[in-house]
Amino acid sequence: MAPHPIIQAIIDFSAGAIGGTACVLSGQPFDTTKVKMQTFPTMYRGFIHCFTSTFRQVGLSGLYKGATPALIANISENAVLFLSYGLCQDAIRFVSRMDKGAQLSDIQKASAGSLASIFSSIAICPTELVKCRLQAMHEMEATGKIASGQRRTVWSVVKTVLKTNGPLGFYQGLTSTMAREIPGYFCFFGAYELCRSKFAQHMGTDKDGIGYLPLMFSGGFGGACLWLMIYPIDCVKSRIQVYSLTGRQEGFMKTFMGIIRTEGITALYSGLTPTMIRTFPANGALFLAYELSRKFMMEKAGK
């Protein structure tokens, strides 16, 4: 028997939060490297140089810089995302005049994920801004864009944003975040569900019976498709959020065109290597934790 809609929403929210935690713990060092390379593409020769330089200069803690806001960001994003994902699936069933609980196609699930990302964008933008600033603060000081010796804590960044821009300052980069999330999560959920369908078809079982490794591979494949689709947009978002430390930053289109004009189109893909390395363990862990915790809670709720 299906649980009450409120219980179902709590299960989706909780499973998304657990998945978000697993994603951060397994992928944060690669995310830190990505943000550094996106905002300062000429400072590092490549992924290995950026990774080792950060480790040598700041230590292991430098690779986990911004982990606290990243945890808050991923927990809030994935909790809201998967809660909205369930509700948006119901909305698509209603629009398509399908019975409640009817099985959706992979494309319909991808559309539900894309729609759900609108709500998760609003949840993630403030914490993404704090995370990106913390991750790139060492480089901002090294290049003289901000005064050296500033405190590098979550609270100090929060206070700076509130002091200079007020509460709305946390939503610098919201347009680029939404431009990233909407097409990105269509690819993310679409590729994930399609990959699971192919595994189930090949193994002669349903999607829930494909096992842990195919499930994790499907999550990683979905993440890879997401990043290949939206990486240039994410690069612009990181620039806006980090460079806004120095004052009011240009909007999405002006920043996008400015990067192409002054640095070339390759600058929009700086940091792609650590992102693609990160995507399989991080998104594999995300979906494994989400599916297992959701299944566990659904079984308990059904008793």
Image (tube, rainbow, N blue to C red):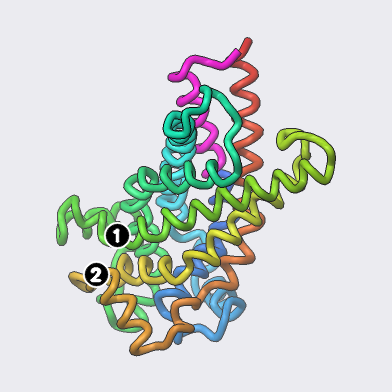
Q: Are marks 2 and 1 in contact (CB under 8 Å)?
A: yes
Q: From the top left corner, tell me how far across and down residue 123 is, in percent.
A: 35, 45
Residue 116 in the image, given as x and y percentages of width and height: 42, 42
Q: Quadrant of the N terminus?
A: top right
**Along the viewing direction, whichever of 143 and 278 lies nearer the viewer:** 278
Q: Identify the residue at horizontal 31%, vertical 52% (top origin).
A: 126
Q: Residue type at mark 1? A: Thr
> From this viewpoint, is residue 289 visible?
yes
Residue tagged 2: 251
Residue 11 vs 268, above or below: the answer is above
Q: Which region shows up in magenta? A: 1-20
Q: Position of residue 66 (x, y in %)?
A: 43, 57
Q: Is residue 199 above or below residue 274?
A: above
Which residue matches tag 1?
175
Tell whether position 30 is magenta: no
Mark 2: give few (<14), some (14-19) or many (20+) Cα within 10 Å.
some
| Predominant SS along the magenta part | helix
The disc label shown at residue 100, or none: none
